[in-house]
Amino acid sequence: MTINFILGACWASFFNLVIQRHLRNESILLPASHCDNCHHRLAWYDLIPIVSFLILHGRCRYCHAQINTLILQTELLLGVGFALIIPNITSNYQILILILFAYLAIWDCHTQTIPSWPLGVWLGLCLWILPWQLNYLKLLPIYLLVTSLNHLSSFIGSGDIDILFLIWLTSGPLFTIWVLFLACVLSLVYLLLVPRLYFNHRIAFVPFLFCGYALTTNFTAQLLTFTIP
Ligand SMILES: [Zn+2]
């Protein structure tokens, strides 16, 4: 579990770098990791996920500028998520879906939007790996109905609906309902703990879906047994 936590934190650190540099139209490789404020090149011991942030009290070692707490939050998110999900993975395609989902969660944290290409890859994986069943066709009108209703009232981001339907395709309806329920509970708890967010009216929801997915994956036996007597 510890190794999976470290693995998740390292993936988060890598995704943060890739996404931040992509948003600034910078190369992923060059220049080397540096402070955004003083541009001092960072040593390896400044780049250890979670540990460096805690040791430096969330500040740059050289200019003492505050480091974005999103970095720590996302490293903890993927650390816990990977620790819960990886022991329950039984096939390679689930690893790919985990990585795509993690990337979507961190992208949403940074931009409150969702890129379409990981959704397309996830859908392609589902159609390629999972056996084609007529049940999947039933999802299409439900998906179109929910998307249309949401377009009118905007109760949730359209990308969040896409992800929920991809989870449905991957793991079934009951699993998806638990993911959505846990994501809603966790986001409410988060809003209560960080009340200033009430004034912004928008939070990134994919990280909460990712938490719900991790918990449901880890406690599948208990949750699904609880639902179906
Ligand atoms: Zn600095």
Image (cartoon, grey):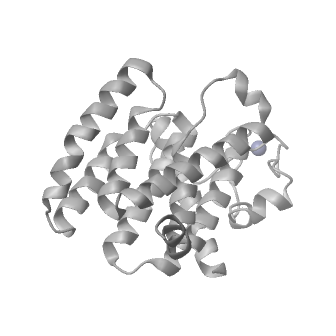
Give the residue at the far front of this rendering.
Answer: 229
Give the residue at the far top of this rendering.
Answer: 152
Quarter assignment of residue 127: bottom left
Q: Residue at (54%, 41%) from the top-left corner? A: 205
Q: Is residue 45 left or right of residue 25?
A: right
Q: Is residue 141 above or below residue 220?
A: above
Give residue 203's position: percent from left, percent from top: 60, 34
State how many labels appear: 0
Q: Please indicate, yes or no, whether residue 166 appears anywhere in the rendered image.
A: yes
Give residue 103's position: percent from left, percent from top: 46, 53
Give residue 184's position: percent from left, percent from top: 59, 44
Q: Is residue 81 above or below residue 30?
A: below
Q: Please indicate, yes or no, whether residue 30 appears anywhere in the rendered image.
A: no
Q: Is residue 45 above or below residue 119?
A: below
Give residue 101's position: percent from left, percent from top: 44, 56
Which quadrant contains ligand 1?
top right
Q: Residue at (54%, 68%) from the top-left corner? A: 226
